[in-house]
Image (tube, helix red, strand yellow):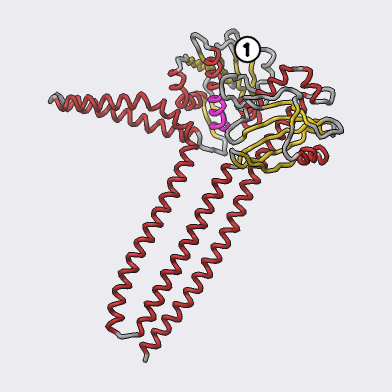
Amino acid sequence: MNRIVTSKKIIYLFYIAIVLFFTYAFFVFIQFKDTKKSIEEAYFQANIEYVRTIAENISKNLQKITTDGSLKATLQKSSALREELERSLELFRTKRYRYIYVVTKESNSERFRFLLDGAKENKSEFLEEFMPLKTEKWVGVYKSKEATFFQNRDAKGLWITYLYPIIIHNHVEAILAIDFSLAEERNIQDILDIFIQSSKTFIVLSLFVLLIVMLLLSYEKKRTRIIKEQSREIQEFNNTLQKRIEEEVAKNREKDKQMLQQSRLAQMGEMIGMIAHQWRQPLSAISSASIAINMKAQMDMLDSKSAIELAEKISEFTQYLSKTIDDFREFYKDKKEKQDVTYKELIDSTLNIVEVSLKNKNIKLVIEMQSEITFHTYANELKQVLLNLIKNAEDALLEKGVESPCIKIITQENRLIVSDNGGGIPEDIIDKIFDPYFSTKKNLNGTGLGLYMSKTIIEEHCEGKLSVHNGEDGAVFVVELSN
């Protein structure tokens, strides 16, 4: 009798556990669906905010160049200005940002005409007529003076058209339009949908398993001999099922790791390319030493002295490889506090990153340490500025095809000077090179932000000054630091 009562209690408690389990599973599932929606909305809003920032910066630049209160008249006067602005718009073109252009609306009409076209091919002419989709959206921007966006779909997929008003003297002069793809958002949605489907499958599978266990527990009321036999079978079944579940969980975890690794590799691509330059020579030396050991061993010529020398060489180059990794990791470490640093430490750390690249391009590097002081500053940010100035000089030398390219770094008390022999910067643009989005790199992927950010770091973060002038042989950048 006591055994029957105990069995009923177990079954009763088991039923309660089942109800609690599925209540909890259902709650988690509903919560995740809400979270999925929040993630999608947050990602979409982040994209819109990023595009709005780009549009706002471009609009400010167009407002600055406008004379007589008319953007159309300003552009009509100068074809060179139009070409320069269109080249700047082309820099924003990527797989994600497919098209960027500026149009204006005729007075008392719903007809639009091109002012600027950022397309690389099939570029529209100045004042060529433009027939937009969803004309009411475009006209609405002129009426409301506020930005808007809408979705479009074509053979290439789903994309967003973002319309930003260019307002001059409280009047909408034109509309800046940016078409960008939603492919990345679709990928995120697909991943979340896969997770939801996996959760559904897991719940159904769990229900199936629990129902089987319930039937087996109910059968326990019958003959003792049958109960013992079936208990053994149930145990075997559960063991097999547990193994399958563990295998599936392991597979899902491995997939998650692979996706995370792919994301990290994409972010580290540029850094790995620079490490490859640093590692090529020591790896070759290690390989040569290894081959020498192997050949001498096969020819019975490997004595202890030779073995020790070759092993020491391998150890030396191995330590060099390890130091290279440490240098890169330290170089990009985010340090929020100021620290003491010398010119030598600053230059040595930066050259560890870029020196091999310069040698591979046959660019001579000259260091003149006329002063060696210690100053208190944001060392890593200053290193990045120095690296940017060196890379800027390297790009200028390569673009101009200088026969004997040379970069010189000079230290003078509180001044750090970086110069090259690339012929200098044209006088008509030298005052603009620190402006955002201004670039002279016609054949390179210049963003026009490198020198702007360098000046911001030096003058706003490090409380110094960054200036440029043309010397006898080329451009001279001067960093003045406060000690």
The magenta stretch is 377-389
Instruction: Say which amino acid is labelled 1.
Output: Asn
Residue in the image at 56% along x and 66% along y: 27
The image shows residue 264 at horizontal and vertical percentages of 47, 40
Q: Which residue is mark 1?
A: 470
State left or right for residue 16 relative to residue 133.
Answer: left
The quadrant in which residue 77 appears is top right
Q: Nearer the viewer, residue 405 or 265?
A: 265
The image shows residue 119 at horizontal and vertical percentages of 65, 27
Q: Give the farthest residue toward the left.
A: 300
Quarter the C terminus occupies: top right
Instruction: Say whether residue 53 is visible.
Output: yes
Residue in the image at 44% along x and 32% along y: 272
Determine whether 38 is above or below 361 in the image. Answer: below
Quarter the N terminus occupies: bottom left
| SS category of the residue bearing label 1 | strand
Residue in the image at 36% along x and 81% along y: 219
Instruction: Say whether residue 370 is visible.
Output: no
The quadrant in which residue 338 appears is top right
The image shows residue 12 at horizontal and vertical percentages of 45, 81
State left or right for residue 318 relative to residue 169.
Answer: left
Q: Give the farthest residue toward the right.
A: 108
State left or right for residue 287 relative to residue 460.
Answer: left
- Number of residue marks: 1
Residue 385 among those drawn in magenta: yes
